Amino acid sequence: MIEVFDFNKKRGKKLLISIYEAYVNEEKLFQYRHSTNGSAPQNQYIPKGVKRGSSLHAVFLFFAVLLTYRSQSKVWFRQCKELYEKRPFLFGPDIKNIPLEKVQKHLRESGFIYHQAGGYRWKRSGEGLLKEFGGNPLAIFNSGSIRSIENVLKKVKEGANNLLPGYGPKLLSLLAMLYEEIGAIEHVKGSFPCDVHIQNQCLSLGIVKPNKEIFKNTSFAEFLRKEISELCYSNSIETTLDLSHAMWILGSELCIYCRKKPRLAEYLCPVFGDCNGRIKTELYYKKGRWNLEEKKEILPLFRRKT
């Protein structure tokens, strides 16, 4: 059966705009957790000697974002910062001369679990960055007359070539948003990285209904990227940056603790009363799938119906 997702635009507008407004007004959770107060990992973990917004910072973010898959952002950004400070040659032109096995070894020693696949992506994408973009990752987003993720993808996946292995629409969206955040580029249309937290919220809030219980997280992320981006633009939100930050912070700082600390979650969450409970993520991390058959696992205890 083909995977099909039904996006409830009315419910999506009501709930996602509520999250967005709480974020921009610094209400609820966002009084304490916000991208502007340095608590986000990309702002918390910048290597020593690297100036925020500089060309070196852009290169660091290019490699850091590349390996955010299947790992906690806070853990990996810290590891990547330490890696840069110990072995900066991995982040520059020398990458073309370093054997793959050594790249994998350095990633393993940094603590990155998927060092073999990660090392391949690191070396190949580093080489692609040098060859196709002159080592300047900001140039990746200068594709087509319209600055959009779709046009960037056409360039990156040009013909039979994959210029930047590991970089699909989700990670390109994340990279574009981090560059926008530091003022390095203008907004890239359609950039909305739908990671595990954002996907989970859209399911638990009933904004999206899949046509089957088990489905791929990659196809779901791409569906949400387009729908949520369009929701922003159609509601006069010119950049998706704030909503993306808001949903990620909500998921990583509150949703994961909802069942254990429901009273706190009720106080801090802007959409608590509309949520059906966070969905289990084991299959997501193990096989890249969602399993809605297990969705009842972590509904807050005091809200369960007897």
Image (cartoon, rainbow, N blue to C red):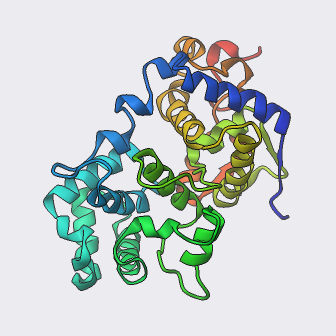
- x, y (%) of residue 234? 77, 42
Task: Answer above or below: position of 236 versus 28.
Answer: below
Residue at image point 18% right, 64% down: 88
Question: Percent from the top left, x then y, of residue 230?
Answer: 74, 48
Q: Residue at x 55, y 42 (%)?
A: 241
Would you say 101 lies left or right of 165 here?
left
Q: Quadrant of the N terminus?
A: bottom right
Vertical order, 271 against 4 (above or below)? above
134 shown above or below 280: below
The structure residue drawn at horizontal position 59% and vertical position 22%, both measured from the top left corner, is 22
Measuring 48% from the left and 80% from the top, which residue is drawn there?
163
Residue 116 image point, x, y percent: 36, 72
Number of numbered labels in the structure image: 0
In this rendered view, identify the residue nearer to me: 251 or 46. Answer: 46
Q: Quadrant of the C terminus?
A: top right
Q: For the view shown, which residue lies furthest in the front direction?
A: 145
Residue 203 rendering spot, x and y as whole percentages: 72, 39
Residue 24 position by quadrant: top right
Q: Is residue 199 visible?
A: yes
